[in-house]
């Protein structure tokens, strides 16, 4: 499969690619990781389509977008698996998937299943942590700087991030350049930097079960 640019995955998503009996409907922020897992595990029975990753900035729109994708594609596949966690929908996405009769990835959000839901839940003292994944490190401006208008009003940083203490970079890949970029983002926000190499953890487990 040919991967779209990060900017296209953010704003447009990914049209269905690949052939198989199982369609994965995923967040655009997970496209690179999912395609890597499909290739590494020879899961050629899977096809992938992605919704725009920027939906995470307005999670109330995720359930409707997922339902629309399910209804568009379900006649062409034997099964559909939704590669979203709750992602800020307050349980609405899980309820919608149950209504549609499709499964989804368990967990509260991608930060949790990348680290492993059990391991992430153990960090109950991290209410002051701001998380980034590989994709969000690369797309920091699209998800943080521009939506929050830091580029025009840097004084707003304290308003939005004054209660945070550290930035946790959950690294799916061992990329020194991404690590340095994540450090710069932490400096920009005035936060302590921490890097955790997570790999794919529960994302891979969930896709293997699918």
Image (tube, rainbow, N blue to C red):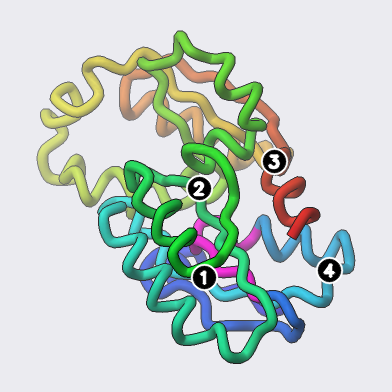
| Above or below: residue 93 compared with residue 128 | below
According to the picture, the residue beneath numbered tag 4 turns out to be 43
Disc 1 packing (10 Å; few <14; some 14–19; many ≥20) = many
Which residue is situated farthest in the bottom direction here? 76
Q: Is mark 1 on a helix, strand or loop?
A: strand
Give the left or right position of residue 95, taking residue 182 as reference.
left
| Residue at which label 2 appears | 85
Which numbered tag is attached to residue 183? none
- Residue 131, x across and y down, in percent: 46, 31
Q: What separation in Å lies between label 4 and label 3 (alpha carbons)?
A: 17 Å
Q: Is residue 166 above or below residue 102?
A: above
Judge from the rendering whether residue 43 lies leftward or rightward of residue 76; answer left or right.
right
Residue located 53% across and 82% down the image: 15
User: What label does residue 202 carry, if any?
Assistant: 3
Q: Is residue 26 magenta?
A: yes
Question: Measured from the top left, where is residue 101 in percent x and y?
Answer: 53, 67
Mark before the other along the chain sequence, 2 or 3: 2
Residue 181 visible, this orientation: no
**Which residue is more in the foreground, 134 or 202?**
202
In this picture, which residue range is highlighted in magenta? 23-32
Residue 50's tag is 1
- Sort mark 4 into few (<14), some (14-19) or many (20+) by Cα contacts within 10 Å: some
Q: How far apart are marks 2 and 3 (CA)?
A: 11 Å
Residue at image position (42%, 68%) is: 66
């Amino acid at each position: 499969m040919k991967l779209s640019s990060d900017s296209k995955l953010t704003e447009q998503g990914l049209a269905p690619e690949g052939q198989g009996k199982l369609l994965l409907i995923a967040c655009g922020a997970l496209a690179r990781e999912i395609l890597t897992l499909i290739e590494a595990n020879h899961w050629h029975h899977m096809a992938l389509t992605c919704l725009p990753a920027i939906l995470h900035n307005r999670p109330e729109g995720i359930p409707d977008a997922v339902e629309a994708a399910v209804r568009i594609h379900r006649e062409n596949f034997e099964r559909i698996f939704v590669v979203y966690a709750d992602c800020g929908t307050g349980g609405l996405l899980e309820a919608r998937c149950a209504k549609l009769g499709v499964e989804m990835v368990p967990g509260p959000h991608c930060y949790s299943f990348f680290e492993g839901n059990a391991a992430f839940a153990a960090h109950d003292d991290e209410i002051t942590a701001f998380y980034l994944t590989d994709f969000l490190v690369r797309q920091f401006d699209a998800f943080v700087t521009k939506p929050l208008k830091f580029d025009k009003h840097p004084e707003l940083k304290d308003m939005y991030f004054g209660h945070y203490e550290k930035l946790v970079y959950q690294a799916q890949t061992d990329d020194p350049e991404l690590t340095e970029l994540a450090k710069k983002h932490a400096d920009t926000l005035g936060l302590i930097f921490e890097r955790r190499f997570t790999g794919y953890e529960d994302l891979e487990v969930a896709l293997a079960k699918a």
